[in-house]
Image (cartoon, rainbow, N blue to C red):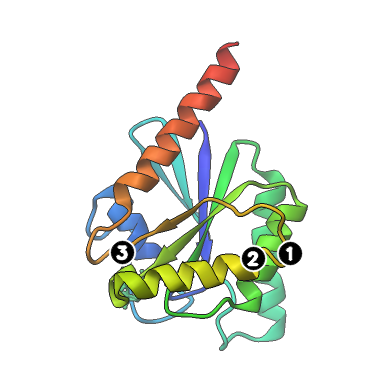
C-alpha cells in the first residue's frame, strides 16, 4: 500500500489538515500546544493508501539532545519506509521561509525522496497576499533548486485545497498501479 508522509513544524496545522483529509473531527487531536504529536500515526484512506502523520519538528522549547533524538526518529522513518511515495512538507502561509523547513526539504532532496509543499492556513491571507507569498517562497526555493516542487494552498478551517490534494494522491496512486501492471 502506497504511503504519503505529512510533516512540518509544530503548530503548522498538520492535525487539522489530516482531519480535513480524513473528514473526521477528532482523529488527530489538534491543540494550540506545540509538539504534541510524539509518535508516528498511520491512517488508512479509502482502503488504498496510508497517510502517515510524523511528529512536528523544530519547536523552540526542547533541549538539544531531545531534538537530536527527534531528528534521528524522523530520518529513521525516511530511511526505512519502502512504501513511501512522497512526503508533504507543511508550511504556515504567514511565515517567511524558515531555515528549518528549507533544510528539511534539502534533506529530502538529497535522500531522493519526492515531496510537495503544503501552504497551510490560507484563510488568514487575502488572495492577492497568497499569490505574493507563494511567488516569494518559490523565488527563494529557486536559489537552490533547479525545479520547483508541487505545491498546494490549503485551509482546514475553510476547507480549501482538500480535493486538489486528494486528487493528486489518487492520480499518483493510479500511476504507480499502472507502472506495476506493466
Ligand atoms: P499541528 O501542531 O501542526 O498538528 O497543528 P494543529 O492542527 O493542532 O493546529 C495548530 C493551531 O492552528 C490550532 O490552534 C488550529 O486551530 C490552528 N489552525 C490549523 N489549521 C488552520 C487553518 O487552516 N486556518 C486557521 N485559521 N487556523 C488553523
The answer to whether mark 1 and mark 3 are in CB contact below 8 A is no
Which of the two labelled residues, at mark 1 and mark 3, occupies the earlier sequence position?
1
Q: Residue at x 49, y 33 (%)?
A: 172
The answer to whether residue 124 is left or right of residue 149 is left
Disc 3/disc 2 C-alpha distance (Å): 22 Å
Q: Residues within 10 Å of mark 3 (few under 14, many from 20)?
A: many
Contact (Cβ within 8 Å) of mark 3 with mark 2: no
Label 1 C-beta lies within 8 Å of the nearest ligand 1 atom: no
Q: Which image quadrant is residue 124 in? A: bottom left
Label 2 and label 1: CA atoms lie apart by: 6 Å
Q: Can residue 30 be seen in this view?
A: no
Disc 3: residue Cβ within 8 A of ligand 1's nearest atom: yes
In the picture of the structure, the residue carrying the numbered disc 1 is 144
Q: Which residue is drawn at 44% across and 65% down?
A: 119
| Rendering quadrant holding ligand 1 | bottom left
* Contact? badges 2 and 1 (CB < 8 Å): yes
Q: Viewer-proximal residue, 47 or 93?
A: 93
Q: Where is residue 8 in the image (x, y as percent from the top left)?
A: 52, 66
Q: Which residue lies furthest to the right in this view?
A: 110
Q: Residue at the location (73% across, 47% down)?
A: 112
Q: Distance between the residues labelled 1 and 3?
A: 28 Å
| Marking on residue 141 | 2
Q: Which of marks 3 and 2 is in front?
A: 2
What crowding class fits label 1: few (fewer than 14 Cα within 10 Å), some (14-19), or many (20 or more)?
few
Residue 72 in view = yes
- Residue 9, horizontal then vertical, whole percent: 52, 72
What mark, if any, has residue 155 been given in the picture? 3
109 relative to 27 in the view: left or right: right
- Give percent across and percent down for residue 17: 35, 60
| Residue closest to the far top | 182
Query: Which type of secondary structure does the marked residue at label 3 adopt?
Result: loop
Amino acid at each position: 500500500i502506497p504511503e504519503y508522509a505529512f510533516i512540518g513544524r509544530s503548530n503548522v496545522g498538520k492535525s487539522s489538515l489530516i482531519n480535513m483529509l480524513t473528514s473526521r473531527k477528532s482523529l488527530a487531536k489538534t491543540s494550540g500546544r506545540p509538539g504534541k504529536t510524539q509518535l508516528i500515526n498511520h491512517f488508512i484512506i479509502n482502503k488504498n493508501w496510508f497517510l502517515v502523520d510524523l511528529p512536528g519538528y523544530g519547536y523552540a522549547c526542547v533541549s538539544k539532545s531531545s531534538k537530536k533524538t527527534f531528528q534521528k526518529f524522523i530520518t529513521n522513518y525516511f530511511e526505512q519506509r519502502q512504501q513511501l511515495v512522497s512526503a508533504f512538507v507543511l508550511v504556515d502561509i504567514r511565515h517567511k521561509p524558515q531555515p528549518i523547513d528549507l533544510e528539511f526539504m534539502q534533506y529530502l532532496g538529497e535522500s531522493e525522496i519526492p515531496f510537495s509543499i503544503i501552504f497551510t492556513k490560507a484563510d488568514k491571507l487575502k488572495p492577492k497576499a497568497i499569490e505574493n507569498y507563494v511567488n516569494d517562497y518559490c523565488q527563494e526555493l529557486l536559489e537552490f533548486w533547479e525545479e520547483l516542487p508541487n505545491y498546494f494552498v490549503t485551509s482546514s478551517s475553510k476547507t480549501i485545497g482538500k480535493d486538489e490534494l486528494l486528487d493528486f494522491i489518487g492520480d499518483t496512486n493510479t500511476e504507480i498501479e499502472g507502472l506495476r501492471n506493466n
